[in-house]
């Protein structure tokens, strides 16, 4: 019985990770209903782990459970997008201020991530581009060294990735704009200018918000 319990938990975790990292970040799936059997076949698990993963995602308000219809990928609403960017701004500005004041900004790692992003051009690499995008911001936050802050920020990951991917598809040339916005953040951190870093973070988030709301 103990082995069966481990197998079910493993299947649920596998289904949860696949749904959160692959299905929910697909712009074409926004607002779409999900087939439990199709997902089970694709992931290689039974329908039970799929159902359990969907319940977990519903509790996080990432999918909607519609009576007699099933699970639907919840589109990012305007209010949710605004709140996401507002919360990110609070956390990322705080991180920039702390790191600059302590002279601990992870400039080399951020520069390496920015160079990696420059190599990821085109729609076919959009998800990887945004995965590195998220890493760029999370490295900034994690460098503060506050475990509770890290956990809180990581909880935004799925929404951040979804919003980022959708933004890339909503506006032609958004990848190039993101690279320039990241460079502005990096340059300010490297110069030890907390005010400029915060302004660059605000500009980056406001630009993303505008693209998402206009799309």
Image (spheres, grey):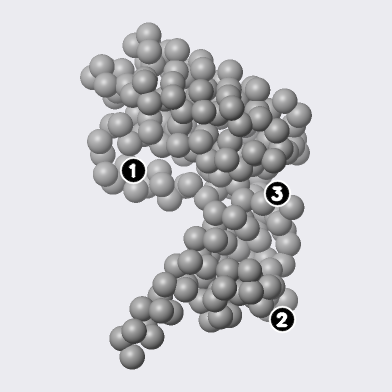
In the rendered image, the quadrant that contains the C terminus is top right
Extreme residue toward the top, this view? 191
**Residue 183 or 109: which is nearer the viewer?**
109
From this view, report whether residue 23 is shown above or below residue 156. below
Looking at the image, do the residues carrying marks 1 and 2 touch, with CB atoms under 8 Å apart? no
Circle 3 residue: 27
- Residue drawn at point x = 50 percent, y = 24 percent: 114
> Where in the figure is residue 117, as x and y percent of width and height?
55, 28
Query: In the rendered structure, which disc, 2 or 3, sits on the residue that comes first in sequence?
Result: 3
Quarter of the figure with residue 144 = top left
- Give neighbour class at mark 2: few <14, some 14-19, many 20+ (Cα, 10 Å): few
Q: Secondary structure at mark 1?
A: helix
Q: Secondary structure at mark 3?
A: helix
In the rendered image, the quadrant that contains the N terminus is bottom left
Q: Secondary structure at mark 2?
A: loop
**Residue 54 or 77: which is nearer the viewer?**
54
> Horizontally, is 36 left or right of 144 in the view?
right
Label total for image = 3
Quarter of the figure with residue 138 = top left
- Residue drawn at point x = 43 percent, y = 13 percent: 188
Circle 1 residue: 150
> Where in the figure is residue 203, as x and y percent of width and height?
56, 22
From this view, report whether residue 160 is shown above or below residue 206. below
Q: Which mark is residue 68?
A: 2
Distance between the alpha carbons at the discs numbered 1 and 3: 27 Å
**Residue 66 or 34: which is nearer the viewer?**
34
Q: Nearer the viewer, mark 2 or mark 3?
A: 3
Extreme residue toward the bottom, this view? 1
Distance between the alpha carbons at the discs numbered 1 and 2: 38 Å
Quarter of the figure with residue 23 = bottom right
């Amino acid at each position: 019985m103990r082995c069966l319990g481990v197998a079910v938990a493993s299947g649920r975790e596998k289904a949860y990770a696949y749904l959160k990292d692959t299905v929910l970040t697909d712009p074409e799936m926004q607002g779409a209903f999900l087939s439990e059997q199709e997902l089970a076949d694709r992931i290689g698990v039974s329908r039970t782990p799929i159902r359990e993963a969907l319940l977990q995602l519903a509790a996080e308000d990432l999918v909607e459970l519609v009576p007699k219809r099933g699970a639907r990928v919840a589109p990012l609403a305007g209010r949710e997008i605004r709140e996401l960017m507002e919360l990110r701004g609070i956390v990322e500005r705080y991180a920039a201020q702390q790191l600059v004041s302590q002279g601990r900004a992870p400039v080399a790692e951020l520069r390496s991530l920015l160079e990696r992003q420059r190599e990821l051009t085109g729609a076919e690499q959009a998800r990887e581009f945004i995965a590195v995008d998220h890493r760029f911001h999370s490295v900034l936050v994690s460098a503060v060294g506050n475990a509770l802050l890290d956990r809180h920020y990581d909880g935004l990951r799925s929404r951040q990735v979804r919003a980022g991917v959708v933004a890339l598809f909503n506006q032609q040339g958004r990848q190039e704009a993101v690279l320039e916005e990241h460079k502005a953040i990096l340059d300010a951190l490297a110069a030890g200018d907390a005010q400029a870093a915060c302004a660059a973070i605000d500009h980056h988030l406001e630009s993303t918000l505008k693209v998402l709301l206009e799309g």
